[in-house]
Image (cartoon, rainbow, N blue to C red):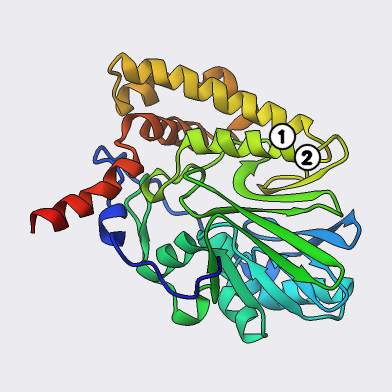
Amino acid sequence: MIRAGLAVVATAVLLTGFAGAQQPPAAAPPPVDFSKVEIKTTDLGDGVYMLEGQGGNITVATAQDGIIMIDSEFAPLHDKIKAAIAVISNLPVKYLINTHFHGDHTGGNEPFARDGAVVVSEVNVKTRLATGTTNGLTGARTPPAAPGALPGKTYTGAFKIRLDGRIADLKHIANAHTDGDTYVWFKTANVLATGDTFTNGRYPNIDFANGGNIKGMIAATDAYLKLTNARSRIVPGHGPIAADKAALKEYRTMLVTARDRMAKLVKDGKSEDELVAAKPFADLDAKWAPTDLAARNFIRVVYHSLADKPAAENKPLLKRILHRS
């Protein structure tokens, strides 16, 4: 069901879920020179394309009367992205779908909305953007987004977007990369856009402070493996296009291995610092960790997925507080 309103109950309680043992934050990377970013377009067939620039991958699906766009990278890239789309079609972007709230996927919300696109997301995305968020690994705070950057339409569970000659099936995966993930399935084109629930060839970020959990990530891959076939094209949140299911299966195996290994270590009472020092995923790092920092961060997010109190257990807290008062 589409909801234009913002769910505000218990947001302040739910945003405080990151654990206290923080590592010293890494040095900030140098700012991106967006003037040097180029947009690469890959034709996936049947009028569907993947765009790569700086940030999350973009999917563009053409219809007879407009375009459905999935994610938008950063606001300074709006003109370049729009120019790349214009090479594909001269029709307007009618819908912009947010797969989750992170800025490298939602940064273009406001400029594309000004162009006339309706921004669509799972309801938790609007909540996170409107209230601001905290990074569980670094403690860095992202302030609330501008009103014009908020999704104009929200849904829960599942939703369909219909244009002439094109249907996009949106489905929410609970507590995976975040608490507001959406995957988009273009059945006739046999193309799946996963957002950051699937990152091809690299460890994913699991935003445990904002509802993410490795168990939900595995549930997402299970859903994708059932949905797709050997000829499906899978657009990951980051990384190259997956031309078949083999990359997705390998990704799932990595996640399950990490979950099972970490579950035993957590049960044994190991601390986060002990695990970072022990490098329990050293055998996986060669393929999945592009840097030492990525290897350490993956240990930490998997640890918090299994060691922290589940977000679902936090929700009754507000009810208990209200009941006592």
Image quarter hosting the C terminus: bottom left
Tell me: 132 left or right of 91.
left
Give me the disc on residue 182: none
User: Picture coordinates of residue 190 (x, y %)?
Assistant: 84, 49
Name the residue carrying label 1: 225
Q: Name the residue nearer the viewer: 192 or 54.
A: 192
Tell me: 64 left or right of 101.
right
Quarter where residue 267 is shown:
top left
Residue sitting at 67 percent across and 85 percent down? 115
Dot 1 amino acid type? Leu
Q: Residue furthest left?
A: 325
Residue sitting at 32 percent across and 28 percent down? 272
Question: Pointers 2 and 1 in contact (CB under 8 A)?
Answer: yes
Helix, strand or loop at mark 1: helix
Neighbour tally class for label 2: few under 14, some 14-19, many 20 plus, Cα within 10 Å: some
User: Picture coordinates of residue 286 (x, y %)?
Assistant: 62, 24
Helix, strand or loop at mark 2: loop
Dot 2 amino acid type? Thr
